[in-house]
């Protein structure tokens, strides 16, 4: 496998070396010391922390210092509504929901329909299409069990959202030069002035509650590490405007079925959507999930499989088998050849389908709840 | 006088050669043919048309064609609220009010507090300062007698305005590259992403009523010619989005007291504010108004003055003496030496003070009317 990879907010290609990425982006590894400090407040550690799916951070020490002084933080995360939600998207949100519960935190959740419009590939698609997708995606977010009293959805192009955000976006945009945007995002002069401006909109929610209330409130942003460049640019700006820099906690990408790059909604075969039927999940995994197994049953029994490159194992590790003992046994059994690829796949299919059955029920219910979550001035 | 001049939306320097500017900008001169067509509908011609203070246009023929087919237009103009309003600012608005009355037209009036913030010189001034100035400036606009039932004020940073405009601004910004903005406005990479984006906000009101109503309505924009580059950029965009290109009608700049460049609120001595007292007006004109008179009374009587470079005469011509016969007499008397500079100044002072007395009364009344003018979704 090539050692080259590229991570920007709009492209992730190659096999990401997370250690290298941490250095490149200038973030800090999420150490056991920090995990232990979190655990002191949460009693237990979420599987996504224990397994280091969240692996890197900015300013978590400061955030915990503030929290321990009694200065509560709010959460900010979001979704670029480009298409249906897949199970990889859910990872940071599931973790965010856990944080909301454990820290009794407000959450601002931004749906960036403006971004997805500005960075779309098909010129003929209107911004309204992305707004519709945002509403669809919102059902998946609600289904995860966020507290409607403490959760505020921002859909950028909606008047209620844009009206409240625009002034702050301008204050941020005022402090970012075209030159900085080019360096951070790889733009050139052929990019639109909307694309240049957009990062300011993504930066706003990290200070919006502070700006609205006229007090400085710490913010924690759980996010996919590909989104880090937006906040790398915005961090200095926040300080210049008199706000705290938000703390960030970065997630790895959920491997796609095809085992090359992250799960991507733009490659349907690489993806399990939250609305897939049990049958579809079964078929996708059986047909497409990249396997660490040997080419024949005989060889597999004799030499064993390679769980470290097996997509099903990655998914169990990352989220679907939270029981450490069971996971260790799967690892050993697969590696020794005792567990076959078909068995590993069946196990994973069952886990995912059990999760999706519940999720789809809650997603259906969410349709009547969406108004409660939309931000109102 | 140097023949060099520079006209951008943010700088006007040198003595503007309007004929040259028309060619440079690619606009068309406002011919008698067009004036006669306007007169057919308005019965009389406004002094600002008769005297060619409005001197250039884009697509006026098309606009009149549409109007004659029964396709009514709306008006759009605006104000960059950088400071108090001076009498030069009023010129295009007075004309706009006349157009509203004669053509029974809706007017969208934009106060670009975002622009004035993004292009400010003093880093420490907040956007809120410009919003305050917008409210102050709005009083001058209301004082001119616009119809509150047909006039909609947009103050860009206000939630009601920004909420309605943002989506359309993004659709426009999507179609303008950084490269285009650089060419039109002289930006480089040291400009902020807010400055790059801003032109999209200025472009919005020309299509906003069409977008809100879902029908295509012709638009006429009376404006200072320095604002033309925004619409030069936006014209192609409007078409791509399925809207009409607006028609534009361009005003010359009101000469400053100092007779170099336009009247500018950033050079107080060059300027008569709408809130100046009769005494202040008198002092400013007596002390600072650039005169076409001779250095001594004797020489003036003998050789006569030069009305063509005299600021007071320019003001009488541009607006304050609408009576053509009286104006011609002043021209002749001043040129022959019969009229002295002090007499010309006194005449002008009296005219301006009479105008300001009425204006200030209406401006005071406007304080209770502003809510009626602010755009509500």
Image (cartoon, coloured by chain):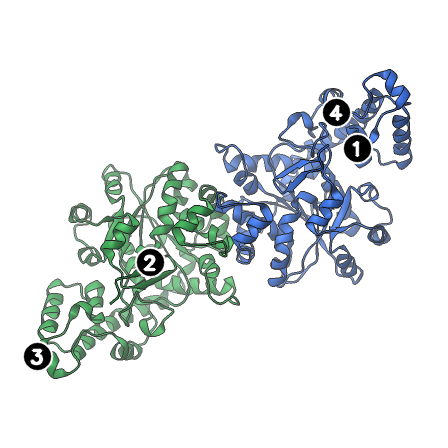
Chain colours: A green, B blue
Q: Position of residue A175 (x, y in %)?
A: 45, 41
Badge 2 marks a residue whose secondary structure is strand
Mark 4 sits on what residue? B289
Disc on res. A7: 2
Does the CB distance between marks 1 and 4 fall below 8 Å? no
Does the CB distance between marks 2 and 1 fall below 8 Å? no
Dot 2 crowding, Cα within 10 Å, few <14, some 14–19, many 20+: some
Q: Position of residue B20 (x, y in %)?
A: 73, 45
Q: Position of residue B63 (x, y in %)?
A: 75, 57
- What is the distance, in whole Å, between disc 1 and disc 4 at their CAs? 11 Å
The answer to whether tags 2 and 1 share a subunit is no
- What is the distance, in whole Å, between disc 3 and disc 1 at their CAs? 100 Å
Describe residue A166's horizontal placement relative to residue B93 as left or right.
left
Does the CB distance between marks 3 and 4 fall below 8 Å? no
The quarter in which the N terminus of chain B is drawn is top right
Q: Chain of mark 3?
A: A
Q: Is A273 placed above or below A101 here?
A: below
Looking at the image, which is closer to me, B270 or A150?
Answer: B270
- What is the distance, in whole Å, between disc 2 and disc 1 at their CAs? 62 Å
- What is the distance, in whole Å, between disc 2 and disc 3 at their CAs? 39 Å
Disc on res. A302: 3
Badge 1 marks a residue whose secondary structure is helix
Looking at the image, which is closer to me, A144 or B176?
Answer: B176
- What is the distance, in whole Å, between disc 3 and disc 4 at their CAs? 101 Å
Disc on res. B314: 1
């Amino acid at each position: 496998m090539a050692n080259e990879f590229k991570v920007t907010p709009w492209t992730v290609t190659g096999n990401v070396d997370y250690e290298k990425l941490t250095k490149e982006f200038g973030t800090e590894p999420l150490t056991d010391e920090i995990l232990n400090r979190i655990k002191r407040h949460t009693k237990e550690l979420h599987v996504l922390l224990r397994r280091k799916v969240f692996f890197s951070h900015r300013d978590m020490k400061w955030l915990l210092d503030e929290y321990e002084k009694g200065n509560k933080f709010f959460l900010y995360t979001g979704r670029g509504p480009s298409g249906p939600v897949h199970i990889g998207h859910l990872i940071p949100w599931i973790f965010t929901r856990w944080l909301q519960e454990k820290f009794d935190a407000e959450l601002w959740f931004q749906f960036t329909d403006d971004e997805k419009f500005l960075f779309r590939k098909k010129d003929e698609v209107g911004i309204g299409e992305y707004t519709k997708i945002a509403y669809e995606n919102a059902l998946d977010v609600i289904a995860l069990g966020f507290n409607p009293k403490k959760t505020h959805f921002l859909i950028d192009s909606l008047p209620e959202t844009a009206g409240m955000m625009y002034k702050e976006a301008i204050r941020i945009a005022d402090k970012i030069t075209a030159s900085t945007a080019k360096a951070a995002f790889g733009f050139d002069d052929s990019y639109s002035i909307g694309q240049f401006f957009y990062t300011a909109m993504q930066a706003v929610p990290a200070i919006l509650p502070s700006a609205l209330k006229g007090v400085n409130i710490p913010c924690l942003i759980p996010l996919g590490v590909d989104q880090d460049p937006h906040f790398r640019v915005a961090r200095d700006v926040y300080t210049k405007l008199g706000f705290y820099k938000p703390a960030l906690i970065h997630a790895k990408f959920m491997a796609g079925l095809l085992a090359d790059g992250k799960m991507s909604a733009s490659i349907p075969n690489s993806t399990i959507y939250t609305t897939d039927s049990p049958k579809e999940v079964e078929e996708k995994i059986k047909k497409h999930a990249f396997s660490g197994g040997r080419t024949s049953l005989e060889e597999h029994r004799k030499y064993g499989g390679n769980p470290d490159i097996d997509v099903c194992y990655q998914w169990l590790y990352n989220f679907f088998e939270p029981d450490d003992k069971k996971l260790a046994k799967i690892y050993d059994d697969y590696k020794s050849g005792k567990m076959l690829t078909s068995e590993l796949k069946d196990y994973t299919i069952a886990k995912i389908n059990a999760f999706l059955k519940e999720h789809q029920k809650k997603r259906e219910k969410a349709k009547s709840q969406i108004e409660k979550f939309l931000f109102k001035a």
